[in-house]
Image: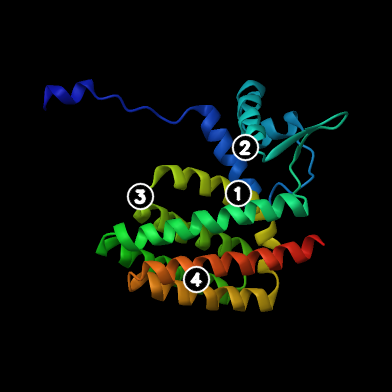
Amino acid sequence: MDTKDTLKVVAAPSLRKQVGDVLRTAIARGELAPGERLVERVLCDRIGVSRTSLREALRELENEGLVTSLPNRGLIISELTGKEAKAIFDVRASLEALICRLFCENASDALMQDFQSAFDEVMTAYTRKQPPAMIAAKSHFYDVLMEGADNEVADRMLRSIHIRVSQLRITSLSDTERRKASLEELSALVAAILDRDAARAESLSRAHVDAAARAALSKLG
């Protein structure tokens, strides 16, 4: 055995990070709904952690805008106003367009194949019409995109944005017409990316997010 290996430190994610990730996933999947009050005792029992670890994670989520502290109510899952949602979609449109362009320019051939496979998963999930499966498949689709784009700053910002709009995405995916249109938009986008047509991919990505924004904002009134 190489003695240099004994100096390697393998650190597990902090408990705070693990708790935060569990909560983010629950918000993204709609398991914690907008406006839902967060009761520490209940969450500690559900997650199996101490109040100290939970509070540390909740402070982080509050900084990210996912959780809101209200007078006399405590912490709740944040609710988006129409103005906030529009602002988030505007940022999302720019970030996803950038990610798509960078993927065309930087992704390896192997990642291109992974990207095609990820889109196949999206198509299968949409055919089955199960929103949780669609959200999971779409998340994997973006994971591959962000890996190939290789921009850590955009990656971090876009992941936060996706969680903020996840509640709106659940609503839009239950709309048959929007679901069909979304798949058509993504099909065109994927074709452009597989051709490494960065300009077209960037344009189609913006168009897809703009369409998603119109659908989501119409639900907010």
Give the distance between the C-alpha atoms of the residues marked 1 and 2, in whole angstroms: 10 Å
User: What residue is disc 2 on?
Assistant: 64
Is disc 1 placed on a helix, strand or loop?
helix
Residue furthest toward the left? 2
- Quarter of image, res 89: bottom right
Report x, y in % for residue 152: 40, 43
What residue is at 70 percent from the left and 69 percent from the top? Answer: 174
> Which mark sits nearer the N-terminus, 3 or 4?
3
Is disc 3 placed on a helix, strand or loop?
loop
Q: Do the residues labelled 1 and 2 touch (CB within 8 Å)?
A: yes
Q: In the rendering, which numbered label is found on residue 204?
A: 4
What residue is at 40 percent from the left and 57 percent from the top? Answer: 144
Q: Are marks 1 and 4 in contact (CB under 8 Å)?
A: no
User: Is 136 positioned to the left or the right of 107 in the image?
Assistant: right
> Which mark sits nearer the N-terminus, 1 or 3?
3
Report x, y in % for residue 25: 59, 46
Is disc 2 placed on a helix, strand or loop?
loop
User: Is 147 positioned to the left or the right of 216 in the image?
Assistant: left
> Which mark sits nearer the N-terminus, 1 or 4?
1
- Quarter of image, res 116: bottom left
Q: In the rendering, which numbered label is found on residue 163?
A: 1
Give the distance between the C-alpha atoms of the residues marked 3 and 4, in whole angstroms: 20 Å
Give the distance between the C-alpha atoms of the residues marked 1 and 3, in whole angstroms: 20 Å
Q: Can residue 111 be seen in this view?
A: yes
Give the distance between the C-alpha atoms of the residues marked 2 and 3, in whole angstroms: 23 Å
